Image: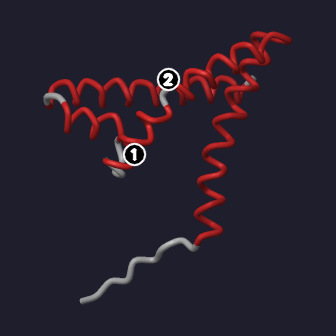
């Protein structure tokens, strides 16, 4: 029995990726503007500088391990299972905290 896997075409896939990237940037920049006001550009510039410094590391990990659960997979291949499991747990907690903050901001 053959099952066909339905794949997205280039334009819908690009739209989804673009939405993921831009929504994160817009979400963070709006929160920075709320709390930092006219000095928000400084905090956003600092965050961009840190990300710029780590760009090669991110590129290498994504290129070597193009699977879901990036932090877990990277640590699983370079450290022990317990260290990778701890990173996975912290990642889940981070996602939960992000969901709570997003819901709270949406309610306001």
Measured from the top left, where is residue 69 in percent x and y?
35, 42
From the image, which quarter does the N terminus lie in?
bottom left
| Residue 82 in the image, given as x and y percentages of width and height | 15, 26
Q: Position of residue 38 (x, y in %)?
A: 86, 12
Q: What residue appears at the point 34 percent right and 51 percent down from the top-left corner?
A: 67
Provide the residue designation for mark 1. Answer: 62
Of all residues, the one furthest to the right in this rendering is: 38
Q: Secondary structure at mark 1?
A: helix
Residue shown at the point (33%, 83%) measured from the top left: 3
Residue 97, labelled with which disc? 2
Would you place residue 10 above or below residue 68 in this image? below
Label 1 neighbour load within 10 Å: few <14, some 14-19, many 20+: some
* First in sequence: mark 2 vs mark 1: 1
Spatial CA distance of label 2 from label 1 is: 24 Å
The residue shown at (62%, 29%) is 103
Q: Is residue 17 left or right of residue 40?
A: left
* 1 sits left or right of 4 in the view: left
Q: Where 70 sits versus 95, above or below?
A: below
């Amino acid at each position: 029995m053959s099952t066909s896997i339905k794949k997205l075409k280039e334009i819908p896939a690009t739209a989804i990726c673009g939405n993921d990237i831009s929504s994160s940037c817009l979400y963070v920049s709006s929160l920075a503007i709320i709390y930092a006001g006219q000095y928000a550009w400084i905090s956003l510039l600092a965050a961009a500088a840190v990300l710029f410094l780590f760009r090669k590391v991110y590129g290498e990990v994504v290129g070597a391990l193009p699977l879901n659960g990036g932090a877990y997979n990277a640590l699983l291949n370079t450290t022990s299972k317990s260290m990778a499991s701890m990173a996975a747990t912290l990642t889940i907690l981070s996602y939960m905290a992000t969901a709570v903050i997003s819901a709270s901001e949406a309610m306001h």
